[in-house]
Amino acid sequence: DIVMTQSPDSLAVSLGERATINCKSSQSVLYSSNNRNFLAWFQQKPGQPPKLLINWASTRESGVPDRFSGSGSGTDFTLTISSLQAEDVAVYYCQQYYSTPRTFGQGTKVEIK
Amino acid sequence: QVQLVESGGGVVQPGRSLRLSCAASGFTFTRSPMHWVRQAPGKGLEWVAAISSDGSDKYYTDSVKGRFTISRDNSKNTQYLQMNSLRADDTAVYYCVREVAVVNDYWGQGTLVTVSS
């Protein structure tokens, strides 16, 4: 199984400041035949199901604010919130869909400082 | 709009069975592989099982193999998760999740399963 490890487990950021979450996979999730990274980011607010923010490591879902961006390739990935808003308080998860079982990182809790 | 509505959760004793259902609407169900993902109280997300669009291929996480069975009825736009020999560590919210172009793009609201004596 591919192990996904996020860092940090939690972070507190001031409103308007940048938040950065890292995700590392135990093996590459880059599919060489199409040069795509099988990596997604989800946002989960309290009492709600997860919401897909980004797929293919860097493709923002329709309707997701452009302050959210994803980067990275192979085994190392980053989710960046460029200017934190109050509504961004949530737990964020990375997920690999390169192989079965699909695995998630442990989650990163983002709070307001 | 896409809707995934789970049902069938509840409180069940260890060793007993439960069947979850997920009714889908707002998209072409027959084209989408489907998944179940669970979340224990206060914990992270754990992928449980998946089924291909025609139901011919099924996949499970190791901890549920031999106990859980995923299935679907494309005539009813519904997928199921039959859970047998339930254990306390199966206690979780179970989410029905759609797959489109390999990506898990839409999640239902979830149904809570509590395994307790």
Image (cartoon, grey):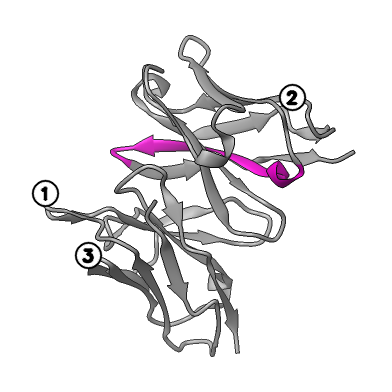
Answer few, some or many: residues within 10 Å of disc 2's Cα (few below 14, many 20 plus, some between 14 and 19): some
Query: Residue sitting at 79 percent across and 41 percent down?
Result: B114
> Dot 1 falls on which chain?
A
Query: Residue sitting at 36 percent across and 56 percent down?
Result: A40
Residue type at tag 2: Ser
- Which numbered circle lies on residue A74? 3
Disc 1, SS: loop
Relative side of A48 to A5, left or right: right
| Residue that protrudes farthest toward the top in the picture | B75
- In-front residue for pair A54/A77: A77
Relative side of B107 to B13, left or right: left
Query: Residue sitting at 51 percent across and 40 percent down?
Result: B62
Q: Kindly indicate whether the residue at mark 2 contacts the one at mark 3 (C-beta within 8 angstroms).
A: no
Q: Are marks 3 and 2 on the same chain?
A: no
Q: Quadrant of the C terminus of chain A?
A: bottom right
Label 2 sits on residue: B17
Q: Examine the residues drawn in magenta and state their main secondary structure.
A: strand
Verify whether residue A74 appears in magenta: no
| Image position, residue A80 (x, y; %) | 37, 76
Viewer can see residue B1: no
| Image position, residue B106 (x, y; %) | 46, 42
Viewer can see residue B116: yes
Answer few, some or many: residues within 10 Å of disc 3's Cα (few below 14, many 20 plus, some between 14 and 19): many
> Dot 2 falls on which chain?
B
Relative side of B37 to A62, left or right: right
Which image quarter: residue B84? Answer: top right
- In-front residue for pair B88/A89: B88
- Which numbered circle lies on residue A34? 1
Considering only vertical position in the picture, is B69 above or below A61? above
